[in-house]
Amino acid sequence: MENRSRKKFLSVVKDLLCIVLGNAATAAGAALFVVPNGLVVGGTTGIGVFVRHFFPDVSISMIVLILNIVLFTLGFLFLGKNFALKTLLGTLLYPGFMFVFERIIGEGKVVEDPMLATLCGGVLVGVGIGSVFRVGSSTGGMDIPPLILQKFFHLPASIGVWIFDFIVILMQCFVCKFEMVLYGVIMAAVYSIIIEKVSLIGQKKMQVKIVSEKYREIHALLIGKLDHGVTLLHGKTGWLCIESDVILSVVPARDVNHLTEEVQKIDPNAFITISTVSEVKGRGFTSERVHLPKKESSDETISSNTKSEQ
């Protein structure tokens, strides 16, 4: 019980660390590279850039904070308390970090080349948002309106995000050079790709399906020697209509080559399919692995189950 509580505590600490560092990285990308180089960006930062053209004495971090609080209130009213609790940290941390980075850089630029700024900003924003999404949290801000539309009008959130970002970028076209708009589009492509990659780091697994006459020996290999979980699916071959169990196993990508080599040693004619699984939840992955007492070999277990079915 104590060990479980300790693991839960460490998991909460890890999630909080991801949220804090993720918001710091996102704010650094915006404050150090996007804003000083006049790049076009979506979200509350983009609205802040637009408003600052008319009120140059107001800091972007202050505009973002006000917008985040307004949008957070809307999220609380329309999406409920649970959602509000998950986005509270991001609502406050992102503008807070932006304020800090604005004070560090002042009126200067970290880099002069707009393309370099575009790439650096895109990478930092992508890593930051991806880290936050990875633990099921949000940076708040313009994530909220698409979720409200999804709830009441069933508009997919991904489409909603693009619509609002497009509107924000369109607003900036009236106050920014068209060249900066194009750099903004490149940056959006960069951080979109990185968000997807970062949010799934460590979660992608490989699903292996094996069809073989020697499925008993392969089953014993996976459970015994390779220590991988196995599910047996009842199947039938399409040509000869021979009934056989199909072995299904989900394994880390690094273990796939070794697994297939060992399987082919047992049966060179084994039919193996390998596909990528974006996320896996369950015993041995997101919950603690339990090793059951081994009373009999895997081969004997399958044989006894087959006899009982007959």
Image: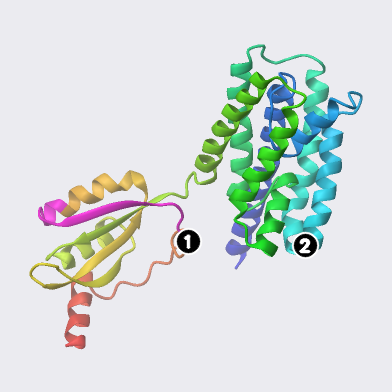
Location of the C terminus (image quadrant):
bottom left
Q: Give the camera-side residue of 241 and 27.
A: 241
In this rendering, which labeled residue sits more in front, label 1 or label 2?
2
Start-end of magenta stretch: 264-281
Residue shown at 71% from the left, 58% from the top: 148
Label 1: element kind: loop
**Residue 91 in sight from this viewpoint:** yes
Q: Is residue 135 left or right of residue 208?
A: right
Residue 275 in percent (x, y) is at: 32, 52
Image location (x, y in percent) of residue 302:
21, 75
- Dot 2 alpha-carbon crowd within 10 angstroms: few under 14, some 14 to 19, many 20 or more: some
- What SS does tag 2 mark? helix
Label 2 is placed on what type of residue? Phe
Residue linked to disc 2: 78
On the image, the x and y values in percent for residue 144 come to 72, 51
Q: Determine the image quadrant of residue 33.
A: top right
Q: In the displayed structure, would residue 8 be above or below residue 118? A: below
Give the image location of residue 122, x and y in percent.
60, 29
Residue under the image location 92 percent in, 24 percent down: 57
Please say whether residue 269 is one of the residues in the magenta stretch.
Answer: yes
The answer to which of 59 and 250 lies nearer the viewer is 59
